[in-house]
Amino acid sequence: MPRPATDKRERLTAAALDLAYRDGFDRASITDIASAAGVAPGSVYYYFKTKQDVGLAIAGELGERYGAAMAGWETLEDPRDRLVAFIDSYRTQSTMVMEHGCPLGSVCTELSKHSPELGAAGAEVFETLVGWIASQFELLGYSAAASHARAIHLVSVMQGAAALSNALQSTEPLTLEGDHLERWVRNSGTSA
């Protein structure tokens, strides 16, 4: 029995995201995407008329994945535990991050090189993540401005640690910074 059309589109999007992450968005050809998804190259154009459309689907998929992660972290009672879960999402993927960089940071950077529209779509995923992190700091008693600054700090340090881990081909930056940020988060709100 043939798979539903949405399944094929999802497989193409997942394959495109994986290729953009591992090889770069511009290097991922339609043929590569089709092959990785197990579909005929011509059928890609049924779902995506242009490479730009593929990029928008990738940004949408990133948004969905991070949205699902944030929803999962929301099940934790303490905002500190939620923030540590975000940090752990890097630490548990440290080998992959060491090899290819942060999935979010790497792919969003790749998309921004392709076009301003794709750059904006990737930035939206980051903005949503920063907003969610800021909301956790607000729950700990920080002002909106202080919460935003703390969220920017947390994401920036993890992105920097991911970039350094990738450049040095070592998980040490992620481990050290993850541990440092966990201590920082655990002490947050105690004297806000």
Image (cartoon, rainbow, N blue to C red):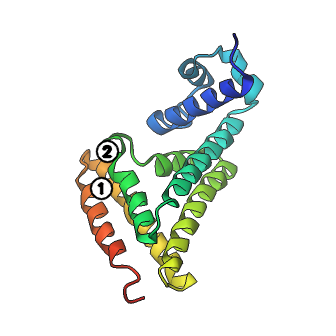
Q: In which quarter of the image is residue 114?
A: top right
Q: Which of 174 and 4 is in front in this view?
A: 4
Pointer 1 residue: 174
Q: Which residue is drawn at 66% across and 55% down?
A: 120
Q: Which residue does the numbered mark 2 point to in the structure image?
A: 98
Asked if disc 2 and disc 1 are in contact, CB closer than 8 Å, the reply is yes
Q: Is residue 122 visible?
A: yes
| Residue at (69, 23) in percent of width and height | 44
Label 1 sits on a secondary structure element that is: helix
The location of residue 119, given as percent across then percent down, is: 62, 52
Please, what secondary structure does the residue beneath circle 2 have?
helix
Assign the C terminus to one quadrant of the image.
bottom left
- Mark 2, other Cα within 10 Å: few <14 / some 14–19 / many ≥20: many
Question: Quadrant of residue 153 in the image?
Answer: bottom left
Residue 172 percent location from the top left of the image: 22, 54
Q: Residue at 29%, 71% (x, y): give it.
A: 183
Q: Which amino acid does label 2 sit on?
A: Met
N-terminal of the pair, mark 2 or mark 1, is: 2
Amino acid type of disc 1?
Leu
- Residue density around tag 1, few if under 14, some if 14–19, many if 20 or more, within 10 Å: many
Q: Provide residue 139's location: percent of width, then percent of height.
A: 52, 78
